[in-house]
């Protein structure tokens, strides 16, 4: 995560701070909220040579980290260890999103030695809820074992306060709403970054969890409660309006997302590549196999994306906290295009989750 000052400075100096890479679509889970609809039956695999080229091009644009987000479960990628070692060899931080099922003691030690940071999964402390959301019975136990191995490898022992190397993602929805405070305490007490996301109406969630979406009032209630907990027990203070609780999301200013087919997006749910209005002769042009990353970054479309804060509408457009928060652009985009809006118009609409 990069703070607002660093994010805006990078944008204004035409520098990338991070890229997010999909490596494979195969997954050992079938999460009901998955934006990519990953699973065992979908087995696209990125070419390792192509990933190295993309990372090399991104390094020339100034990146400090590479987020290996998989698209599916990245530890299933055949060249996973080679990829992590390559990123580390360039002096870039490897950051991994994983469900932690395959996090053996040996693998966690390898990741620790290669300066990686890890974002695991913990949607619920109740096995039946975690199993349901992950789409497979018995998975809760496996997730907790992987998380325990990461903790034992030293990932929950930060070199200095605030410099955490371990986090867990949990997607807030009607099934885990009552235990969000317990998950938050668990994370804070174990030096784990609580990456609480809000269920977004995209991917598989549209089909399987539509009735589990939270209202703006419910989101407001739990965010203010978590802020109270942090102030009282852990010495943290943060802006409650940002899309990721306790941390803003400014990816659109400093990051690019490259999916398994090489299509470039601002972030995972901002699926510009799937919208017919942005295709030329039936193809999405902003693809790393057709254009260099530098050309894509400098294009009119992605220049617009990086400067989205200047054209935001509604409450976001005149918000006093604009230097810290631009709302969840992925959520705004998903809601907008689902209603039939033009993609660039949808991208700048006000954040539906904000309660300011």
Image (tube, helix red, strand yellow):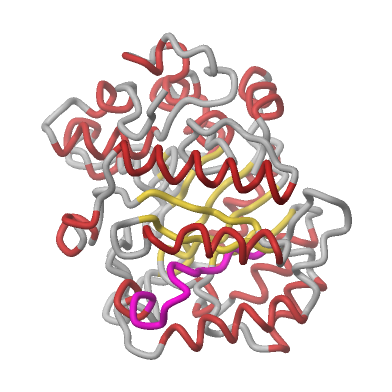
Instruction: Determine the residue located farthest toward the right in the rendered image.
Output: 159
Q: Residue at x 37, y 69 (%)?
A: 25
Q: Residue at x 68, y 63 (%)?
A: 166
Q: Does residue 97 appear to the left or right of 179 in the view shown?
A: right
Q: Does residue 102 appear to the left or right of 327 in the view shown?
A: right
Q: Nearer the viewer, residue 239 or 164?
A: 239
Q: Nearer the viewer, residue 69 or 59?
A: 69
Provide residue 122's location: percent of width, then percent of height.
Answer: 49, 69
Residue 122 included in the magenta stretch of the image:
yes
Instruction: Determine the residue located farthest toward the front in the rendered image.
Output: 232
Q: Quadrant of residue 176?
A: bottom left
Q: Residue at x 79, y 51 (%)?
A: 163
Q: Is residue 114 above or below residue 14?
A: below
Provide residue 330's location: percent of width, then percent of height.
Answer: 36, 39
Provide residue 45's location: percent of width, then percent of height.
Answer: 42, 71
Looking at the rendering, in which quadrant would you find the C terminus?
A: top left
Q: Residue at x 76, y 81 (%)?
A: 152
Looking at the rendering, in which quadrant would you find the N terminus?
A: top right
Q: Is residue 325 above or below residue 68?
A: above
Q: Does residue 234 appear to the left or right of 201 in the view shown?
A: right
Q: Quadrant of residue 48?
A: bottom right
Range shown magenta: 118-130
Provide residue 190's location: percent of width, then percent of height.
Answer: 71, 67
Residue 319 included in the magenta stretch of the image:
no
């Amino acid at each position: 995560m990069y703070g607002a000052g660093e994010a805006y400075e990078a944008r204004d100096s035409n520098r990338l701070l991070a890229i997010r890479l999909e490596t494979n679509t195969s997954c050992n889970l079938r999460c009901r909220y998955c934006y990519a609809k990953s699973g065992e039956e979908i087995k696209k695999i990125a070419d390792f040579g192509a990933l190295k080229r993309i990372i090399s091009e991104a390094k020339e644009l100034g990146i400090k980290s590479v987020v290996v987000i998989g698209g599916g479960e990245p530890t299933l990628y055949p060249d996973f260890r080679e990829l992590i070692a390559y990123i580390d060899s360039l002096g870039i931080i490897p950051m991994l999103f994983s469900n932690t099922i395959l996090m053996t003691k040996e693998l966690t030690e390898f990741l620790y030695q290669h300066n990686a940071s890890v974002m695991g999964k913990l949607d619920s402390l109740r096995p039946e809820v975690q199993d349901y959301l992950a789409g497979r019975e018995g998975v809760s136990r496996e997730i907790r074992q992987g998380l325990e191995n990461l903790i034992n490898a030293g990932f929950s022992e930060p070199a200095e306060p605030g410099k955490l190397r371990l986090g867990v993602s949990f997607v807030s929805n009607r099934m885990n709403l009552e235990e969000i405070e317990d998950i938050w305490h668990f994370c804070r007490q174990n030096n784990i970054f609580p990456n609480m996301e809000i269920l977004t109406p995209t991917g598989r969630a549209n089909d399987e969890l539509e009735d589990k979406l939270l209202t703006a009032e419910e989101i407001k209630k739990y965010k203010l409660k978590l802020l109270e907990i942090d102030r009282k027990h852990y010495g943290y203070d943060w802006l409650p309006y940002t899309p990721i609780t306790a941390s803003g999301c400014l990816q659109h200013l400093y990051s690019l997302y490259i999916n398994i087919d090489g299509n470039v997006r601002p972030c995972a749910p901002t699926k510009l590549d799937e919208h017919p209005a942005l295709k030329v002769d039936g193809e999405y042009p902003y693809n790393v196999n057709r254009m260099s990353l530098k050309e894509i970054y400098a294009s009119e479309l992605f220049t617009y994306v990086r400067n989205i804060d200047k054209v935001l509408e509604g409450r976001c457009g005149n918000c006093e906290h604009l230097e810290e928060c631009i709302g969840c652009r992925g959520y705004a985009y998903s809601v907008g295009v689902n209603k039939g809006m033009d993609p660039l118009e949808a991208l700048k609409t006000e954040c539906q989750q904000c309660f300011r």
